[in-house]
Amino acid sequence: MKYRNGGFLISKIHQLSGRIFARKLKESGVEDLNPAQGRILFVLWQGDGISIQELSKKTSLEKSTLTSMLDRLEQSGHLCRKPCSDDRRKTLIYLSSKHHTYRETFDHVSKEMIRLYYEGLSTEEIDTFESYLERILINLERHAQL
């Protein structure tokens, strides 16, 4: 049987892309955020006022990890927590006005990362590759719920 190293390659790609992304953010003047915090902001840019549970699901971060990251983002003025008016047990996460200065930079750096990822690949190759990744993700999500 041939040895398969797709998981190892994905892990290495994740590690390298995180380093490159962080470097590009720093070069663009964003020094107080790391890529994982950027992932939180990215989800909130799609729509804030969501619960920690929903944010955890959308970012694939464990609640305990997410809570400490939210603490740092709140302390640095990027977001705020407000009690839910419908369910007092829930806390909702909202962006502060500070996030606007970072969104354009994150969008620019993200576009640059996409260019780096797909350098030398045709549109058809990219589509095929992404369809394989989606299938792998579905497989893993199915087993994660066991």
Image (cartoon, rainbow, N blue to C red):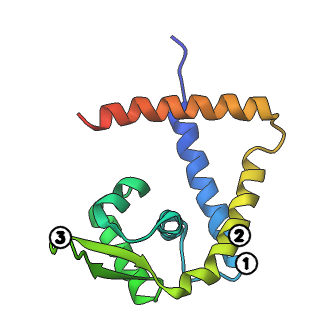
* Numbered badge on residue 28: 1
Inter-mark Cα distance, 1 to 2: 6 Å
Q: Nearer the viewer, mark 1 or mark 3?
A: 3
Mark 2 is surrounded, within 10 Å at the Cα level, by few (under 14), some (14 to 19) or many (20 or more) other residues, namely many
Please report contact status of discs 1 and 2: CB closer than 8 Å, yes or no. yes
Q: Distance between the residues labelled 3 and 2?
A: 40 Å
Residue occupied by mark 2: 24
Indicate the position of residue 23 as horizontal and vertical percent values. 67, 70
Amino acid type indicated by mark 3 = Asp
Q: Depth check: give the residue in front, 69 or 82.
A: 82
Q: Earlier in the sequence, mark 1 or mark 3?
A: 1
The numbered disc on residue 110 is none
Left or right: 73 as drawn, with respect to 27: left
Q: Is mark 1 on a helix, strand or loop?
A: loop
Quadrant of the frame with the C terminus: top left
As shown in the figure, which amino acid type bears the numbered disc 1?
Answer: Ser
Q: In this view, does 62 lie to the left or right of 121?
A: left
The residue nearer to you, when weighing 63 against 10, is 63
Q: In this view, does 98 lie above or below 85?
A: below
> At 55% from the left edge and 66% from the top edge, which residue is drawn?
35
Q: Residue at x 71, y 70 (%)?
A: 24
Q: In this view, does 44 lie to the left or right of 12?
A: left
Reading the image, the residue beneath label 3 is 87
